[in-house]
Image (cartoon, helix red, strand yellow):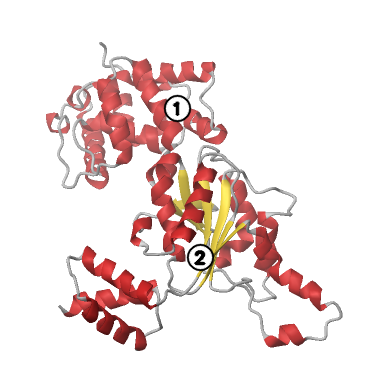
Amino acid sequence: MSHNVNLSDLLVLDFLRSDPTLSFLDARADDATAKAQCASRLIANAERLGFSGNLLPRYLLYILTRRPNLVSEMMEGTDLPPGNSLRDLFYHDVSVLWPLLTLPTSAFLGETALDNYEPTQSVYGKTEDFLFPGVEAANAPAEYAEILLAFYAKYGYGDIADYTAFRWDAAENTIRGIEHFERPSMNDLIGYERQKEQLIRNTRAFVEGKPANHVLLVGARGTGKSTAVKALAGMYDDMGLRLLQVTKDQLQQLPDIMTYLRRFAGKKFIIFLDDLSFEDSDAEFKIVKSAIEGGVSSCPPNVRLYATSNRRHLVRETWHDREQDELYRDDTMHETISLVDRFGLIIQYHMPDQDEYLAIIDYLLKQKGIELTKEELHIAGLRWELTHSGRSGRTAQQFVAHYLGER
């Protein structure tokens, strides 16, 4: 097989033509400097991204799954496999790249150390678990191409494939993956079984493409409302669920955010509005109402809003609001609760009673290999509660951190 690869022959993976790491393909066969520069780029990427093994095929696999191309964008945007013509063109391009995807790196750059590279720190994730067995067993370009297409169908590409949780970048009007996302387990939330069941049932219906509601989790502080929403992302990320946190000062952009998320038809997004509350004069109040229901542009089918709040109606109310002299006072009250009405599922969280509070402490301590007697638990836990902000899951966690720190 010839080692000559002409990137100008690429039709749908043409972005590779401008990749500086592949510039050695345009250099003369005796241009040692150009090859050394490309080898240096491969080594830098291997150390930065944790590549191991045969570096050139490993690097190509990375950019074919992380950088957008016509095929991956079409599949993600339509949630459909590529048409026959586009699939054939994709096969063609993988055939063009086949020597780069299969031969030792030294066959092109002359550095045998790059054929079985060991980085300082290896990085190996779930997407590699999916990809490596298939591509290593592929005996023909079409087989390799089909593995990539299966990857695009399951994970997407770029940050959408790599991350479970995202934040909105208002400056760039795009989403950014959260690298150090806390991945709590629903099992770590003690009690609230009915609330967890409601939340899981609605979310499962959503990821399965069935009718599902927007959700409002409301009630006492420190009861695990936010943790429960974060736990959902870990439960269903393999089914295409992604979590996007949007802050209150970004609510003005909510219509734009929803329009942006429409392009990822192959994924389901929970827009997470944590600790949501408004003053009655907040313009964002009506924006959220319209985004959920009632605006000219409907909420995308792949998006649901999950909000947490300590306020029952999301809007701060005072006695003055109830006693004001407005002629149609009921209209004001209806306006106040109209946003809550947009959430089809409202889950109430109560403050844990004493037994529930102590059970949370007991569970957390046992996770660390510590067991207290019932009397010790009662004395220590209640003493902590009296000097802090009352009974809650958060207070229990703070007690456990203090207890472990004093040992």
Q: Which is more toward the observer, 231 or 91?
A: 231
Residue name at image x 17 percent, y 65 percent? 369
Q: Nearer the viewer, mark 1 or mark 2?
A: 2
Q: Which is more toward the observer, 140 or 63?
A: 140
Above or below, 232 against 397 in this view is above
Left or right of residue 353: residue 169: right
The residue positioned farthest toward the top in the image shown: 1
Local SS, label 1? helix
Quadrant that contains the C terminus? bottom left
The residue positioned farthest toward the right in the image shown: 327
* Separation (CA) of disc 1 from disc 2: 42 Å
**Where, by quadrant of the figure, is residue 158 drawn?**
top left
Residue 155: percent from the left, percent from the top? 42, 37
Residue name at image x 53 percent, y 40 percent? 264
Residue name at image x 52 percent, y 39 percent? 208
Q: Please tell me how crowded label 1 is: few (under 14), some (14-19), or many (20+) other residues with Cα within 10 Å.
A: some
Local SS, label 2? loop
**Where, by quadrant of the figure, is residue 362 drawn?**
bottom left
**Amino acid at pointer 1:** Asp
Q: Mark 1 points at which residue?
A: 14
Q: Mark 2 points at which residue?
A: 274
Residue 171 appears anywhere in the view: no
Residue 354: percent from the left, percent from the top? 37, 78
